[in-house]
Amino acid sequence: MRVLGIEGTAWCASAALYDAEADSVLIESDPYEPDSGGIHPREAAEHMSEAIPEVVDAVLTAAEAEYGPDAIDAVAFSRGPGLGPCLRTVGTAARSLAGALDVPLVGVNHMVAHLEIGRHRSGLENPVCLNASGANAHLLAYHDGRYRVLGETMDAGVGNAIDKFTRHVGWDHPGGPKVETAARRYAEENGDPEDLLDLPYVVKGMDFSFSGISSAANDAYDDGVPVEAICFSLQEHVFAMLTEVSERALSLTGADELVLGGGVAQNDRLRGMLTTMCAARGADFHSPEPRFLGDNAGMIAVLGAKMARAGETMPVPESAVDPNFRPDQVPVTWRAGDVPVARGRGDEDACGDGDTDRRGAEATVEIAAVGSDAGAATDRCDATARVRKRRVPKPYRHPELDRSIRRDRTVSEARLTSEARRAGVPTPLVYDVDVPNATLTLQFVGDRDLAAALDGGEAWTDAVGRHLARLHGAGIVHGDPTTRNARIADATGDTSTAADRTALIDFGLGYHSGHVEDHAMDLHVFEGSVRATATDPDPLIESFETGYAAVGDTAVLDRLRDVAARGRYR
Ligand SMILES: C[C@@H](O)[C@H](NC(=O)OP(=O)(O)OC[C@H]1O[C@@H](n2cnc3c(N)ncnc32)[C@H](O)[C@@H]1O)C(=O)O
Ligand SMILES: Nc1ncnc2c1ncn2[C@@H]1O[C@H](COP(=O)(O)OP(=O)(O)OP(=O)(O)O)[C@@H](O)[C@H]1O
Ligand SMILES: [Fe+2]
């Protein structure tokens, strides 16, 4: 099968020919380069009108020269997300070409194409995918016929966040490559600088935010901080955030493969951090070659071929473009029969057979009976046992950022675990806090992570809802309430209520806030983790919300709807 792909969601007018038998890809692209500032939608659309026919013509001519008049078996195009006027130009071109050639039409989701190209090029079967592009940033994993969004930016796309800073300092679009060059020069000239600017580092579960860091970088520039120093710190913070959430996604799903995609994936420092993180976890990492990273029609043609083969062609009347097309709206029929990536790791038995070590995304956890050395094998996993949780240094992170993150999270985890307990939320007792070693000694709670008991676990999710409501009532935000950060006791024969046998752990991302928005974000994180790992998430989410409503403020549930709707691409 040979597919002609067309891309033109924002800046890159591109056409490609994918020959599936030979696995070869020919790409012709013509980028729009704004004279000043960022992308102007009207200018971008004008560029598409001129450039799309030219790149399509070039590819079609080359195809027919090589394969004759029947060179093309299908036409694939980017249906969204992207800028409406650009998408419409591409859609019109694709429809008329499919009509003229009398071949089927395939409407491709641009974000799914960014991730599928990594899977295709690497041969990795079931990876977690980090899309780091201009207008987007999200983590995706295949589960039950869809790519689920495990985490995403709460505001700007990662490239746009960087470009916002370069516009402020008067650099041409795109700014990302210039920041990379300036940061590299700064590192070389200063011999791996020890100091970093103190910029916002915001992760909430597997979601993250860039709006604060763009503004802080602009302010630093206005205050006279050298621009290269800002570029260096900006990269260290932004890419560490993306690497941290990727590690959380691997940990939550139990996956051991990661692929990277999108224009920002061309950045060496980002690729370096992800390589280091994956190596430390024993996971495989792949990032395709640069021509498949920034927007390009090659990835559209490759996914188009997979979709066409699975019968995912569309009649012209149904082929309208969609500027807000989300990756999780796409039925992933070309992977039918694949096992879900989200296996859930919580089914490891933390108490059995001397399995005393656990490894989360951030910390190593050792379990020990009282009186024995932490780390020694034990069968005493009851409430008298202790866990020693140590936040290990992360070699991918700049050492100063790493130190401050581990210290701050250790301190807040100790404080908030105790405060939550005083507010009536079951949490472990805190026995010891060793700040220099980022180590906590905590009471052992529960028998299993909730992640391992989700099937039919409505009573447990109801309990988590109640506990979060009580926590929020006390002005505390958990910050990372996933199914791996709730422990349940179901093997004790205990007849007390599920709420009494459900405990919250891991308050390291917690903080004080009475804001409805912050409380709603906690609910959003929990529901995201249920959706990512449960076979049948809806009843679990329903009972979670019922539990929350029974104890807490229903305005938070109303705001949750807004938070979920806002996690759409701007
Ligand atoms: C919807 C679609 O139109 C959009 N496309 C898009 O954002 O273009 P993409 O090619 O994936 O990414 C462009 C971004 O990638 C950044 N970029 C390119 N090279 C970079 C580098 N070496 N370091 C950092 N950022 C880089 C640019 O600054 C720009 O913000 C998307 O995929 O979100
Ligand atoms: N107090 C505790 N009682 C029983 N088990 C615990 C306790 N603390 C941690 N664990 C176990 O260790 C695992 C990792 O701990 P924790 O979540 O605190 O670390 P983490 O590195 O932040 O992990 P993650 O990224 O998975 O949230 C938990 O999922 C749980 O199984
Ligand atoms: Fe893109």
Image: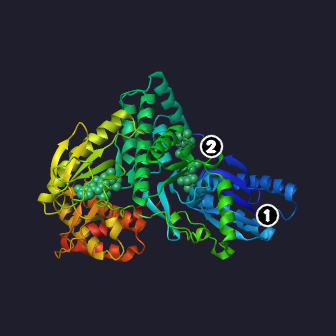
> In the orientation shown, which residue stands out farthest toward the left?
422
Q: Nearer the viewer, residue 218 or 178?
A: 178
Q: Tag 2's secondary structure?
A: loop
Q: Which of 315 and 506 is in front in this view?
A: 506
Left or right for 101, reference 477: right
Identify the residue shown where x is 36% and y is 36%.
219
Q: Do the residues labelled 1 and 2 touch (CB within 8 Å)?
A: no
* Residue 563 location (% of width, % of height): 36, 63
Number of disc labels: 2
* Residue 496 location (% of width, % of height): 16, 74
Q: Name the residue under label 1.
A: 72
Q: Name the residue under label 2.
A: 33
* Residue 24 location (% of width, % of height): 74, 53
Q: Between marks 1 and 2, how big is the CA–CA gap?
A: 30 Å
Instruction: Residue type at mark 1: give it.
Output: Ile
Q: Which of 38 and 229 is in front in this view?
A: 229
Left or right for 474, reference 459: left
In the image, residue 498 sits, relative to residue 240, either above or below, namely below
Q: Which of 165 and 435 is in front in this view?
A: 435
